[in-house]
Image: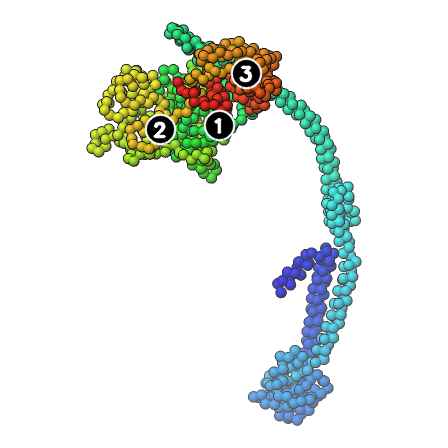
Amino acid sequence: MRRFAARLKQRFRSAPLSNKLLLIVLACSLLALSLITISSVVREYRMAAQREIESLNTLSDVLASSTDAALRFEDPTAATAILAALRNEKHITCGFILVEEGKTFAEYHRDEPCLPADALATNLEPDIFVVSKPIQVGGEQLGTLIIRSDNSDLRAQLITAITIKFAILILSLGASLLLAKRLLPIITDPVTELANLALRVSEERNYDLRALKRNNDEIGTLVDSINFMLSTVRQRDKSINETNRNLEALVADRTVKLVKAREKAEAALEAKSDFLSTMSHELRTPMNAIIGMSSVLQADGLDPNRARQIEIIQKSSSNLLNLINDLLDFSKIEANRLELENITYDLVSCVEESLDIAAAAKKNNRLVYCASFAPNLPSQLKGDVTRLRQILVNLLSNAFKFTKTGSVTIEVNHVPADRATGERMQISVRDTGIGIPEDRLNSIFESFTQASQSTSREYGGTGLGLTISYRLALAMGGNIQVESEVGTGSVFHLTLPIDRAQSLNTVVGKPLSVKKPLQVELRDLPPALDASLRITLTAWGCKLVGQRKEAGTEADLIVASALSEDEFRAVEKATRIHPNDRVIQLCHSDHAILIRKTTTASVLTLPIRIRDLRNTLLKYVETSESPLYDPTSPFASYQTEKWRNLRILLAEDNELSRNVFLHHMELIGIDIDTAYNGELACELALEHDYDIIFMDVRMPKLDGLKSARQIRDKQSENRKRPWIVGFTANTDPDALLEIEKSGMDDYLSKPAVIGDIADSVNRYFFERGEDPSSLKDA
């Protein structure tokens, strides 16, 4: 039933508006006419029944007054004769006169006889009326008159009235339906027209259409509103179209301007890049001569005063070269031309090399400086090790620069992965220097900014180092944060994502391969160095013990401090320990020679390298572990006996640079040919069979790139192919790609020192399939 009702309800809601209105009108008319008909029939029936009852009451009054004499004289026959007069009333079926105790005194029956009790029981039937009237004489009741009337004709009259009313009802409904159908279009037609208009507007998007107003009623108001809305939309569309046309013209005009501006900016950027490349070359070329000639002069036997002057020249040149490098790096970052490498590197070596480089730059360095590593850090990572080293050297150099006493430490910790980021490493550079004011912490990473003008005057610097480091960290997916307190020191936190080298899963804190843990005593170490060594030794499985005061705690090895400002004081501290003890003495590098001569201890200099410490420990234990080796560095000296058979050509237009290179080759013992431009270099290369050609990329008449192509194109196949090395100051990826396309085999970044040249020769032997083992550490 509910489903049927719901279905009817849904059908009603989906019906057209005219049908809904028609159904509503018919329902209201039917309800009203039905109520009127029912009330009329009920009223007529009640009036007829009332008239019948009044007639019976009148008749009973007459009979009661007529039969009082018969009751008084107890004459039933007279009373019966009086009741017989009821025969004239066809609807009266019976009558009784009852006396005391309900005895029948006289009675009348039209058809079938009935008892007084039956007559009274039919009083509940709708078409039978019963009237009971007391018979009194002088206030005394002599009996009771009962008359029963059968009003079947009243029922017939009621049915007839109902039939007539129903017919009138049907006719009225029909008339209402016809009238509603006739009048409803006055309301529904405008609404239907509005609906059709809205449908056309939505389909055709034609806002010129208008609705026809028929009357001034609510629907007419609605028509006016819709027409106004359509007119407003039309005006708006016209305005939008006009705006679009103007906007298209404006956009086209601005696009042309932007294209021109972009082309101009690109041209300016290209000009800037060319300018930087040219200036880099022009600046590095004399720098190459200055640094090279000063290194040559240092090899001669100079008096101390001259040696000191040459040292100042060389350090000033190095500082100027660092400034040039900073400016070039900053320009690359500003131009978004910085590209990062993704190669496998050793984390410990990178950090320790950075600490070595930064510490070596500080004059008379008597600070305590060390590195510590979380044991669970992977030792082999992937990334741009050159840029990471650049950041660390910059942070460490600042720490050494602004720290006069105390310590400089670098701590590398592992940060586990969380829901937001993967695993990371946090490298913290901590110093006990002058600190940074709190109001300057947010600005130290801005370009050309230092903590104060007095800092710039006292310590030097351009304020670019931290800016470059910060932007490099962001480019590598990390960040740099700083904590500092004036007079206490600063801590720079470098956070970078960890990209593990999948094929190498070793960790930094690999335990020693020993049968029994090595017991180590740390004696008189500075706090920073003590904390660093405790982390490292504990990770290696060593057991740390205190001073030998308790039984059973004797150390297998003592690591002691001989750190001091004065060399003789350092030696005195080193000789305090009994010579039979197995001892590792930690000292500054310039004190190591005298301490080795005066003691039998193993000596390690600051900064303590993980490799050196581990190899030293392995000397004092029984182990199957092999010592870690130190790969040849680009700063090492080379034995060059095999080099003397090489034929080398140098093509360099700058006379100073040629002289520096010639001096380097003279020190090695090699005579070389030179060319001052590209054309002469091509002629010599085609006449002679050179093993290696060192060629400047930028030269007059014919530059190095074109010269290399010409040599490759014109050289016959049966002749020996020379190894061509390009000198360049522009190490952008695009420039290096051009070098490779020209046919060059290698390149060296200016200024190229002897170590760079030696490495290039080493690569020549390796690529030619010859054993480069002759290039060993001196």
Q: Which residue is mark 1?
A: 384
Of callouts 2 and 1, the N-terminal one: 1
In the depicted structure, whether residue 126 falls above or below residue 595: below
Judging depth in this view, the residue of 327 and 505 nearest the camera is 505
Res. 68 image quadrant: bottom right
Real-space Cα separation, disc 3 to disc 2, in angstroms: 44 Å
User: Can see residue 254?
Assistant: no
Q: Which residue is mark 2?
A: 627
Pair 2/1: label in front:
2
Q: Which residue is mark 3?
A: 689
Q: Secondary structure at mark 3?
A: loop
Looking at the rendering, in which quadrant would you find the N terminus? bottom right
Give the crowd class for mark 2: few <14, some 14-19, many >=20 residues within 10 Å. some
Q: Is residue 516 left or right of residue 775?
A: left
Judging depth in this view, the residue of 47 and 154 nearest the camera is 154
Q: Is residue 531 left or right of residue 59?
A: left
Pair 3/2: label in front:
3
Q: What residue appears at the point 32 percent right and 26 percent down from the top-left corner?
A: 616
Q: What residue appears at the point 76 percent right and 42 percent down from the top-left corner?
A: 206
Which amino acid type is shown beneath numbered disc 3?
Answer: Asp
Real-space Cα separation, disc 3 to disc 1, in angstroms: 39 Å
Question: Could you tell me if the residues under marks 3 and 1 are in contact, i.e. CB atoms within 8 Å?
Answer: no
The colour scheme used here is rainbow
Which amino acid type is shown beneath numbered disc 2?
Answer: Pro
